[in-house]
Amino acid sequence: MLFSKDFRRLLIVCLKMLFRKTTRKRFICLVIVFLFMMGFNTYGYIMRYHKTEIQKKEILEEKAFKVFFLRMRTKNDTARFLALQGRKIKDYGSEIIQGAFIYQNNLYIHLVSHLDDISGDYKNNESMELLYDLVNVKEVNENFFTEDETPDVIHIKGIYIDHNGNRLIDEIIAGRHKSIVSDLRDIAWIIRDEIKGGRIDVFNSITSTIVNNIKRSSPGEEFESNPYLSRIENIVPLSFLHILANIRLDNTTDFMDLAESVRYSEEGFFETFRSYLMSPSIYVNNIMYGDMDIYPRYIPVYIPDIITPQWNWMLYQDIGINTAFLDYIDGLHFKGHYMFSYEKADILQDKVKIINEDIRSNHINFYVTDLSMGIAFPFMISLFAFIHLKTEISFLFMFKNRIKEILLIFWLMPVCLILVVKGSVLGAYFFNLLDNSSGIQTSIGIPLVLTFIIAAAVFYPINRWCFSQFTSNNLNLYSLHKGR
């Protein structure tokens, strides 16, 4: 019926009647006011949607919120924590990252080689990859290991990474270097416990070779540390501790070979046996060096789904937060397991709350305003047509008997106008204003479509009510034609 020849002719007649000389100005003013109000409301909704989506995307992609460093007070406290809380941590969908810990504001991390036997269980580990990105050691990690011509020998860079040392004066950098060397000596002294006889001298000699030749590596002047990890001063590869720990555990090598097991070259590489770079057997499936008195020590807890996008019943996406996990670590903090960056949890909850409130208020305001205008404007169009055109409509009805088509036309015209306004504003946004890097989803159009369908459905009986005198049982076309 919509595409029939008679319907098209009737549509043209109705449009001519609306734009006749006596009604043209009033009708055009009515349409312009509607276009402005509906377009402005749609534009405001889209712009605020764009803003909140960017904020939502930023917080969802902030990897620092997925790692919390918990303080362990002693080595016995660490063992007790693992025994009592290990299972509970997994129940919350989180895990302890076993290949990293913080000691004296320095992050000790297990670097993963492309060599499978050295990488162990950490190769392609999601939590370790996250830490590499956070502390900017991904590129360092890829070039840290170099194979030797001898299959059992491997080279590693003799470096630690100064994580937040950009723009520091030389005196401070020298003091920090002295501090990290002193820490390595202290850790080596803890590791060598229980070594007896001449092996102590060999162990001390290897320790001196490492700590005297390790060099500072800067991540680059353009690098800015993550604000939530800015307290980390240096990043130290655990490979150096692995060498010392494996030497302590190696009781099969004689003194002469043991003394030659670690050598330093002028090119800045340590040459050692491949087996010494593997995770010591006692730390497989366990926290690295958790049996030693390295204090204070923080261990990282990885929670991948602490914040996730979720659908609201009003057909928009906001941010869902794992409040149960946050309450859990807040309880741990209360019990003395302090967090390395405790304020991060409060910042996360406050930020999520603000963003969700902005998203909700934007959609509620849009729904209320859009539905109000989307119903009021078509009603005014139908009422306008009945009041000013009932003489012409009754004339058409007397000769054409097309009341169904006339009702459809005056229902269809404002509905199509609403669709054109919404589609034009949304189309202009996608083609001209949308920043492709923001990754805004097409779900932006769902509320627009929903309000359009509701407004069109509600207007249908309203439109029939406006023209009820043409559809009633007692129809007096003469009176209508005379304008009574």
Image (cartoon, rainbow, N blue to C red):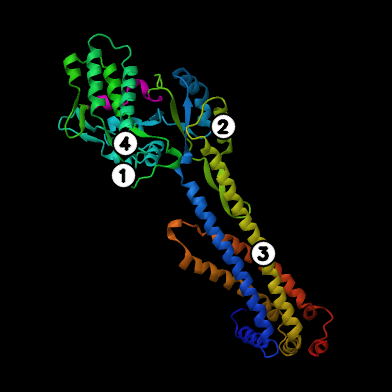
Q: Callout 3 environment at 10 Å: few (<14), some (14 to 19), or many (20+)?
A: some
Q: Quadrant of residue 288?
A: top left
Eye-nearest disc, 2 or 4: 4
Number of marks drawn: 4
- In-image side of 374 versus 317 (left or right): right
Disc sitting over residue 330 in the figure: 2
Residue tagged 1: 220
In 3D space, how far apart are the residues under numbered discs 1 and 2 (Cα atoms)? Answer: 36 Å
Q: Mark 2 or 3 closer to N-term?
A: 2
Q: List x then y, in percent, for residue 57.
A: 49, 51
Most extreme residue toward the left is 149
Front in this rendered view, residue 308 or 177: 177
Q: Quadrant of residue 409?
A: bottom right
Q: Callout 4 environment at 10 Å: few (<14), some (14 to 19), or many (20+)?
A: many
Residue tagged 4: 161
In 3D space, how far apart are the residues under numbered discs 2 and 4 (Cα atoms)? Answer: 31 Å
- In-image side of 282 versus 320 (left or right): left
Q: Is residue 453 above or below residue 482?
A: above
> In the structure shown, which secondary structural element does the residue marked by tag 2 occupy?
helix
Q: Mark 4 or 3 closer to N-term?
A: 4
Q: Which residues are magenta?
A: 273-288
Front in this rendered view, residue 242 or 16: 242
In 3D space, how far apart are the residues under numbered discs 3 and 1 (Cα atoms)? Answer: 52 Å
Of the residues shown, which amino acid type is indicated by label 4? Ile
Of the residues shown, which amino acid type is indicated by label 1? Gly
In 3D space, how far apart are the residues under numbered discs 4 and 3 (Cα atoms)? Answer: 56 Å
Q: Is residue 209 above or below residue 422?
A: above
